[in-house]
Image (cartoon, rainbow, N blue to C red):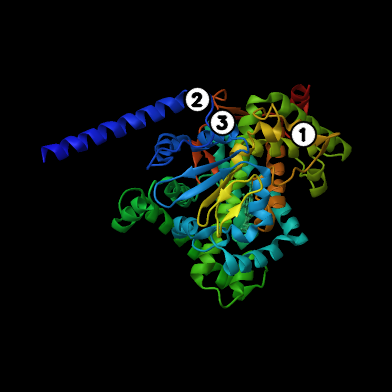
Amino acid sequence: MEVLSLQILLLLFFLSLYFYLYAFSSKKKPASKGFKAYPIVGALPEFVRNRHRFLEWTTEILSHCPANTAVFHRPGKVHGIITASPLNVEHILKTNFENYPKGDRFINLLEDFLGRGIFNSDGELWRVQRKTASYEFNTKSLRNFVMDNVEVEISTRLVPVLAKASKTKQVLDLQDILERFAFDNICKVAFNVDPDCLGGDGTSGGEFMRAFEDSATLSSGRFMCIYPIFWKINKYFNVGTEKRLRESIKIVHEFADEMIRSRMEQKTKNNDEDLLSRFIGKEENSTEFLRDIVISFILAGRDTTSSALSWFFWLMSVNPDVERKILKELETIRSSNGKNLGDTYSFEELRDMQYLQAAISETMRLYPPVPVDTKACKSDDVLPDGTFVGKNWFVTYQTYAMGRMESIWGKNCREFVPERWLENGIYRQESPFKFPVFNAGPRMCLGKDMAYIQMKSIAASVIERFEIAVQNKEQCPEHLLSLTLRMKGGLQVKVSIEVNCTGSLSLVRRTH
Ligand code: HEM
């Protein structure tokens, strides 16, 4: 017995020594090539140590790998790769699209929140939703409807809320305001329902907003769980974060159910065609499925543009020269079209805002609203850079890291330079594989054009009317890794009125 204990002690001693030497020797290497994989436990210790800074950690790793691609070993059968290579991204999202579905693992993690909505489905279920939604998104009437809605939301809700805050000198969470704006907008555009979340003092619908945020953050927290069994046990016993998740999802579901019920009633009264009515019109769609569709579109429409604009306003506060150039561009557009400050911009005028478009794209290059996207590999494959990917491995492309790769954007990749998007002053599209902020290939974002209309309208109306003083602007806001890249604690700002919409005295000061 004593001999056995001694043997176990010796074994433990040598194992500890081995891990210590292994870790120590790899610390001395100047740059890590890929994830450090320990015997038996794989990359898990590193993952545990760095998961609170997952995006930065993986960016560091990928930037040191020759093809910006790293293999991730986990104990048991889970292996995967993380890539920031445009060639690999093209292969995964387009060339070999059928081999890289979302997969069961991903779908199970998000199913309680998103059900089998468009973001969380594969195969025929995805195809049907994509087809129906594409039809709706391709119409010119949608573009006009978006333009009208955005204009009304800006002039009757956003501007009054900011103007009021400027009078009271109150500190505002701009991220929250932008989320409310985007939420009202997507509900009107997609479901023909106005929740008026930004109406009044801009705080209505607070319970739903909180529940939606918690549902997204806690669901994405499951991705960071070392073993899925952990969250599954918590879910089974309804404890911890899983208890909170269940409560939040219940609130979100009730809201969506109520919206569908009221839309179904309306349907009998008028025959307005919107996205939801296209789905309601199909008898085979159950109310649960309609709910999944509603929640997915709220997520798509609410959390993406608001994330991009929050980072945009913070970047403006630390890059006043860029803001001045945008103001100058707006002034030129107004004067050549005989417009006053405060007048609404037409679709053509928004299209002419080339520098603003560049500044918004540059924001999303550094702070992509959807920072990571994961697929599953259906059968063994080899990526264009020679990396082997096994069946059932996860395959993640890291958009956040891609915006910070010297190999893609050059030496100044970490600097905020809108000019990199311009050729002779005209905005130049980038390859979606180099800049997969809106995804690429058959699952490319359907709301890209709508998103730019909304973001440009808001950015232009706000910066030409108000001075936005971001609190503690020198410190880069911390991000919260949810399904989208939100700012932890929001974006606290003080607003002051820059111009009174009839004159441009202050504007002259700011543009020179
Ligand atoms: C800055 C704004 C936006 C960004 C960066 C963005 C980005 C993305 C990304 C990365 C995906 C792929 C997600 C995945 O596969 O899991 C996606 C898909 C999608 N987006 Fe957007 N999006 C934006 C705005 C919008 C808006 C306003 C809508 C309108 C409702 C929208 C509708 C969709 C839809 C329906 C899909 C699903 C496409 C599919 O799976 O077939 N997006 N978007």
Q: Nearer the viewer, mark 1 or mark 2?
A: 2
Residue at (61% x, 42% y) in the render: 399
Q: Nearer the viewer, residue 386 or 404?
A: 386
Q: Secondary structure at mark 2?
A: loop
Between disc 2 and disc 3, whose residue precedes?
2
Task: Indicate the position of residue 37 as horizontal and vertical percent values.
Answer: 44, 38
Residue behind label 1 places its C-beta within 8 angstroms of ligand 1: no
Q: Which mark is residue 493?
A: 3
For residue 502, the mark is 1
CA neighbours of label 1 inside 10 A, class few (<14), some (14 to 19), many (20+): few
Ligand 1 under 8 Å from disc 2 Cβ:
no
Counting residues from the N terminus, which is met first, the one under dot 1 or under dot 2?
2
The amino acid at mark 2 is Lys
Residue extending furthest front? 3
Q: Give the mark, 3 or 1, whose residue is nearer the N terminus.
A: 3
Quadrant of the drawing holding the C terminus: top right
Q: Are marks 1 and 2 in contact (CB under 8 Å)?
A: no
User: What is the three-letter code of the residue carrying label 3?
Assistant: Val
| Residue at (60% x, 70% y) in the render | 279
| Pointer 3 local density, CA inside 10 Å: few below 14, some 14–19, many at least 20 | many
Residue at image position (49%, 41%) is 481
Residue farthest toward the bottom in the current orientation of the protein: 283
Picture mark count: 3
Residue 12, visible in the rendered structure: yes
Q: Position of residue 506 (x, y in %)?
A: 74, 25
- Whole-number angstrom distance, CA of label 1 to CA of label 2: 62 Å
